[in-house]
Image (tube, rainbow, N blue to C red):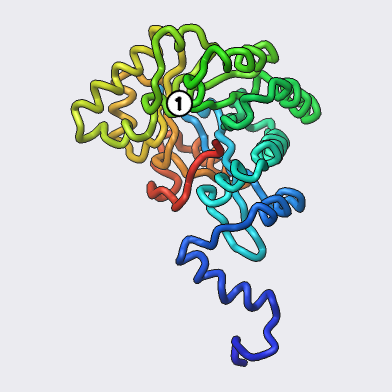
Amino acid sequence: VDPASKPMALTLLQDLLRPLQDANGGRRPSGKELGDALECGELDVHFQPKICLAPGGTTGYAALARWHSPLLGEVRPNLFIPIAVETGLMGDLTRVVVQKALAAIEPWWGDARLCINYSPVLFKDLDYPDRLAEWTHAAGVSPDRVMLEITESEAMRDPVRYIDILVRFRLKGFHLSLDDFGTGFSSMQHLYELPFEELKIDRSFIAKLKDDADARVIVKAMIELARGLGLYSLAEGVEDAETAKILQTMGCQGVQGFHYTRALPLDDLRAWEAKRLEDPAMGPAQPPIQAPGEIELP
């Protein structure tokens, strides 16, 4: 049978066009398509572990949004997240990610925290800490199990203004992580004053550790700074064992990256953790190649 015979079923046409969409990076979806996807539950959440370097256990799982559209195929985050910001859907997208991620917490997580990127566009909503507390309560999850990751460039843009909502999160029991550290413009005073507990060193520095002496000096200084301020130091974008070893020698406490695994659906994550329990020294569970458009929810 000729697959292009007429009349052609819509599902067949979608199957024929999907490889072309993937090869070209996919067309840019509209705001309405994203809104409809949020309404009908097309968006899912994958999780990437945060690993403690010393004992080797998992301290948290970063929740990352994923969209598989029946019409568009896999829509990369670097396509749909900017659309959410432009069309005012960031609040709805964050709600879907948070609620699905909270529902995914299972007993085998142990004490590992759920880590959520908190979008800069939501900083103006002073009621958001109350709303997040309602979602955690409805899911039967303590706010102490949730860490919000906030980019350095946004947190330090107007720290006097943003300290209000950050303190509200802490008073509710949520934890705060300063994400992409090294790419913004933190002052020592602001780092001291704002209620962060974790400092995530940006991947742009980590990628150069093996070959760049200057990068090693800078990363070492960041780790020492975190230790001096009583913050947990975590390096993101770790893609090989040598980099992980350098970070451990420097005294970095935690790591996250493709050396361990890419972001996984919940069932695959459960299997990955079970395998690590059997062999804690196992190498990367997935090929250490960053998937196109692999970005965290901002």
Along the viewing direction, whichever of 181 and 121 lies nearer the viewer: 121
Residue 250 sits above or below residue 180 on the image: above
Residue 186 can be seen, yes or no: yes
- Mark yes or no: residue 266 visible: no
Residue drawn 66% across the image and 63% down it = 70
Q: Using the image, determine if residue 91 lies above or below residue 189.
A: below
The image shows residue 271 at horizontal and vertical percentages of 57, 44
Relative height, residue 67 to residue 62 (above, below): below
Tell me where residue 42 appears, x and y as whole percent: 69, 53
Q: Position of residue 107 (x, y in %)?
A: 68, 31
Please state the horizontal and vertical placement of residue 2, each as a whole percent of the image: 59, 91
Q: Which residue in the structure is indicated by mark 1?
A: 153
Identify the residue shown where x is 43% and y is 7%. 189
Kind of residue sitting beneath label 1: Ser
Q: Is residue 102 left or right of residue 292?
A: right
The C terminus sits in image quarter: top right
- Crowd band around label 1 with a 10 angstrom C-alpha radius: few (<14), some (14–19), many (20+): some
Residue in the image at 46% along x and 24% along y: 152
Residue shown at the point (41%, 48%) measured from the top left: 290
Q: Is 29 on the left-hand or right-hand side of 200?
A: right
The residue closer to the viewer here, 190 or 157, is 157
Name the foreground residue: 126 vs 258. Answer: 126
Q: Judge from the rendering whether residue 229 lies leftward or rightward of residue 149; answer left or right.
A: left
Local secondary structure at mark 1: helix
Q: Return the residue nearer the eye: 270 or 98.
A: 98
